[in-house]
Amino acid sequence: MSSRVCRTCGGSDIDVDQARGSAVCTGCGSVLEDNIIVSEVQFVEGSGGVSSAVGQFVSADGPVKAPLLGSGFHTGVGKESRAQTLQNGKRQIQQLGSQLQLNQHCLDTAFNFFKLVVSKHLTRGRRTEHVIAACLYLVCRTEGTPHMLLDLSDLLQVNVYILGKTFLLLARELCINAPAIDPCLYIPRFAHMLEFGDKNHEVSMTALRLVQRMKRDWMHTGRRPSGLCGAALLVAARMHKFRRSVKDVIGVVKVCQTTLRKRLTEFEDTPTSQLTIDEFMRVDLEQECDPPSFTAGQHKVKMQQLEQELARKLDEVEGEISCYKEEIETELEKSRPKLRGIYAAYAKEMDPEDEDVLSSPSDPEDKEGDDADLQAAAQRLTQDFLCQVIQEEGGRAPQEVETEGAGLPAQGASLASILGNASLGLQESFHTFNLPEPDQNPDEDPSPSGELDLEGIDDQEIDKYILNEKEVEVKTELWTKQNADYLKEQKEKEERITKEKEQGTYKEKKKKYKKREQIEAATAGEAIEKMLERKKISSKINYDVLRDLNQPAGSPASEPPGGAAAAPRKRLSRRRRKAGDANAELSAGATMMTKRFRRLISSTPRKKKAAPQVETAVVTETASEAVPEAPPAAVPGPAPAEAPPPVETEEEEEAAEEDCVSALRLVGDYGCEEEEVF
Amino acid sequence: MTGSEEEAKLGARRLARCLQKLGFKVRFSAFRVVNVLAVCSMPFAVHLVDFTKNNRPIASYEPELHPAATYRIKNLKATVQVFSTGSLTVTGPNVQSVASAVEHIYPLLYECQKPRCK
């Protein structure tokens, strides 16, 4: 109700009486409005004294089933589609949501999401059920209900990753930040499914504590929450003396056995697992652990480092190996001939340890035989000792190793520097190799013609990759054996096709649609004619008889065409577009016939002036009589001046032209004049 | 590190040479590196939930689907997948973008790191 001012006195105090439907100014008393539309509920007395309210129920979704469907059809077309989509979506949401036992509020929210999605055109190209599922899951996440994406995919029998993709996309587009899943949410649900009876609550609480502990121990990042819950529940159940096997738990939680076992093992590795049940319930350890995969990775790296450092440390360790080596060396010194200059320098100046170090990492060039033997022997012995030491080391607790490791880096550094000097040459060469590369323009195409640039390719190496004859044979055999099924299928298909081709029943599977030529026509009639020509000709026409009309057959020939023409005539009348247009009708009639006829028609000279003569003459059915009467010149009259030059095979004798034409005229004329008769 | 792109081209050429030797007619033109995948590892573990919370909506983490948090850098057109162990996989259109992506994301990861306790 708008506060208006009174027209007479200007007062703004207006009294609106809803019941009477009038607006009166309280200042001057003038009636401003009468018969205001009121929104009162009215009651009507029905038969038997029953009073009912007047009105009809309207859907909350808007005027979907508009009562003015008949008259308002055109305006309603666009909106109807959208409304229908929404309605369909709402129905599906209700259906799916009820299966998940979601309350109405969630379903409404999901529907709102769906409306947003539709308005953003994100439903295009996606299955509605995927979109619905994603909307529902979005609601589940925002509300924090214990529903997993797995549940939805179970219901829909759709791959969970596909649903996940849709869900992620929708969440991104709608800018909805769904809070991360907390495994604690799932505990009550799974506990309920595992049927702990009275102690349900207690078991749940224990399991919750376990999960929280797991979270602190960094077991939950990057893992499916259901796996953690499963492990926690299993342990909690055992703690409260319930017998739940791994199988029961995985049936409820939907992870596989391996996952569950792994979680349990990981939990076992944490210090919390060492506590007793009571201690666990009371005490919470301060210390937090690293994520298990991180620990595993670190462990591996550590082992590798350790191995390397031990190998270097080996030289420092007084052991059998040094003694052996020295012994061998002295022996060889005595027996071997004088070394070449450079090696002599090496043997004397450098320490035996450095020599070892140099020999093992850097590629030993072709040394002299004795030298090689010496190195090989030394290496083998080194490795043996290494293995022994590592085994011993591996057995010790990690802490000890670490303290040793601390001492190792210092020695490692010195050795590394020596190593660095030796391998510097190698690095330099590598650098020089690298440098010219960036100088080149990486985008430059050396040969725009597509020629393969052979620069930098080692042909010999390439040749090594290519298999020789024997290898090719072996590989072919292997491949054929592996793909035997597929090859068999292909062969059968080939045979089938050839057989069908022989029989003539072969159907080309791939329908290649040739591009249709554009129809060029001067008038509408001609266009119609051409169109009908190209379209499939009717099966109701007896083509043999039509063809026989070319022969100079008498009246018997005319009857069948008359009969045959009756059908096209009827159709002609049905197909008529302009009732009064004789030419058009005739042309239409002409096109009903085979192409041959039209060719005959068009081949004759066209003159329109004889048209009325022809029409009067053609009243009689007998073609033979009509034939001699009608001059050939007048023949083309009824036929349209712009008869198309049809393209087809050679015609029969031109002499029979007149007969055919007259028959056609008959047909055409009957089309226009005899219409009333039929 | 543009050397790697050159190496890729070299490798492709070698393959083409192989085919050529086998007798096929070979044309080598318009070689283009379309995607580069790199891995690297942080010396610390990363708390994915915090990381995702701090970097909404660029980062997304869905443990039910994939163990890593995905971080898409729009202007570089690169994607970084962060695992809780601190390892990253970076994909991008060229080596430069991958390198810049790592530099870009390092401070963000550093904030949400999980201190090593052992």
Image: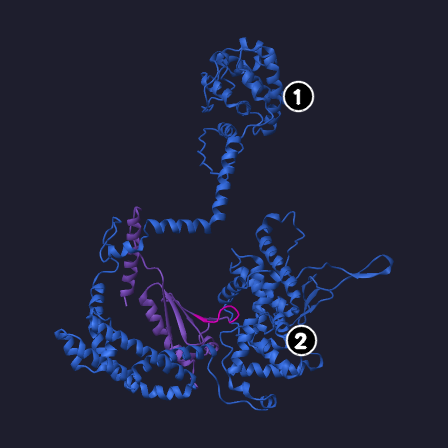
Chain colours: A blue, B purple
Span shown in magenta: B63-70
> Secondary structure under badge 2?
helix
Residue A110 drawn above or below residue A125:
below
A474 or A10, which lies in front? A474
Q: Nearer the viewer, residue A196 or A27?
A: A196
In this rendered view, identify the residue nearer to me: A397 or A147. A397
The residue positioned 50% from the left and 45% from the top of the image is: A489
Percent of width and height locating residue B74 = 39, 67
Disc nearer the start of the sequence (1/2): 2
Q: Quadrant of residue A94?
A: bottom right
Exactly how many numbered labels are in the figure? 2
Q: Residue at x 38, y 86 (%)?
A: A402
Give the amino acid at mark 2. His
The label number, if any, that marks residue A677 in the structure image? 1
CA distance for labels 1 and 2: 85 Å
Q: Chain of mark 2?
A: A
Q: Is residue A312 above or below residue A584?
A: below
- Specify whether residue B68 is painted magenta: yes
Which residue, given by chain and number where applicable, does mark 2 sit on?
Answer: A192
Residue A535 in view: no
Magenta region, main secondary structure: loop
| Image marks 1 and 2: residues in contact by CB distance under 8 Å | no
x 70%, y 61%: residue = A35
Q: Is residue A58 above or below residue A256?
A: above
- Residue A434 visible? The answer is yes
Split into 4 quadrants, where in the image is the N terminus of chain A? bottom right
Q: Position of residue A567 (x, y in %)?
A: 62, 24
Q: Name the chain letter of the residue that bears numbered label 1.
A: A
Q: Is residue A432 left or right of residue A282?
A: left
Residue A53, by quadrant, is bottom right
Residue found farthest to the right: A48
